[in-house]
Image (cartoon, helix red, strand yellow):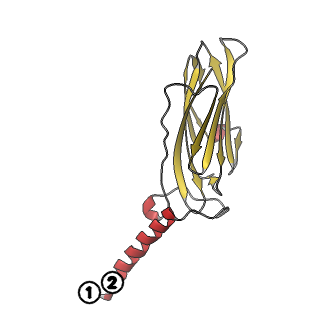
Amino acid sequence: MSVRAIHGRLLVLAAVLSVAACKKNPPEAGANNGRDPAPQTADSGVAQATADTGVAQVASGPRAQVPGEHCDLTAVIAAPAAVPGASTIEVELDAKDGFHINELDDVQLQLEGSNATVRAELARTDATESTQDKIKFVVPVQVSGAAASVRGRLRFSVCASVCIRQRLAFNVGL
């Protein structure tokens, strides 16, 4: 076997081992506090796990807590003064475990109402607060009948020494 072939095989082995090590070893707290590039594929050494909790058919009540990988999502719908009437839903994502929310990757919040009218899609630019530690959306809801609910799905990335794409879903109601 030639030296070139051995060298090529060693490079492939080193790449495979580095990807495996990134997925097995948790990042250190505060690691890579600078801005991260957008998540890449697992072949490049960056984990691309996706958590999708699905959307519950029945609302969890006016408040939902959804744990993600290295983050927590909270969704709260406020009761209107009267039905029909105006309300709001607050959706907040908090990073934890030394991870931060990737500011260079897109964030997408999709909402759908039942007996309620709500904006269907929002992006990071629609957030009322957007930092590396937290993203918060406050969205108007027009409640049109009893047992109103809002289902939603938030797509984002959290990063430390690796970036992880996630989708978290919730269903809140009155």
Determine which quarter of the picture holds residue 84.
top right
Are the residues tagged 1 and 2 within 8 Å (C-beta)?
yes
Instruction: Residue 4 in the image: state x and y as whole percent.
Output: 33, 85
Q: Which mark is residue 6?
A: 2
Q: Residue furthest left?
A: 1
Judged left or right of residue 159, residue 79 is right
Disc 1 marks a residue whose amino acid type is Met
Q: In the displayed structure, would residue 15 be above or below residue 155? A: below
Residue pictured at 63% horizontal, 17% vertical:
143
Judged left or right of residue 131, residue 50 is left
Tell me if mark 2 has few (under 14), some (14-19) or many (20+) residues whose alpha carbon lies within 10 angstroms of its own.
few
Give whichever of discs 1 and 2 has the lower sequence position: 1
Disc 2 marks a residue whose amino acid type is Ile
Q: CA distance from mark 1 to mark 2?
A: 7 Å
Instruction: Residue 128 in the image: state x and y as whole percent.
Output: 71, 37
Q: Which mark is residue 115?
A: none
Determine which quarter of the picture holds residue 138.
top right
Q: Residue furthest right?
A: 81
Q: Nearer the viewer, residue 95 or 113?
A: 95
Asked whether residue 105 appears in the rendered view, the answer is no
Residue pictured at 69% horizontal, 18% vertical:
86
Q: Nearer the viewer, residue 144 or 125?
A: 144
Judged left or right of residue 118, residue 15 is left
Instruction: Residue 41 in the image: state x and y as whole percent.
Output: 45, 58
Q: In the displayed structure, would residue 32 be above or below residue 148? A: below
Which quarter of the rendered picture does the C terminus lie within? top right
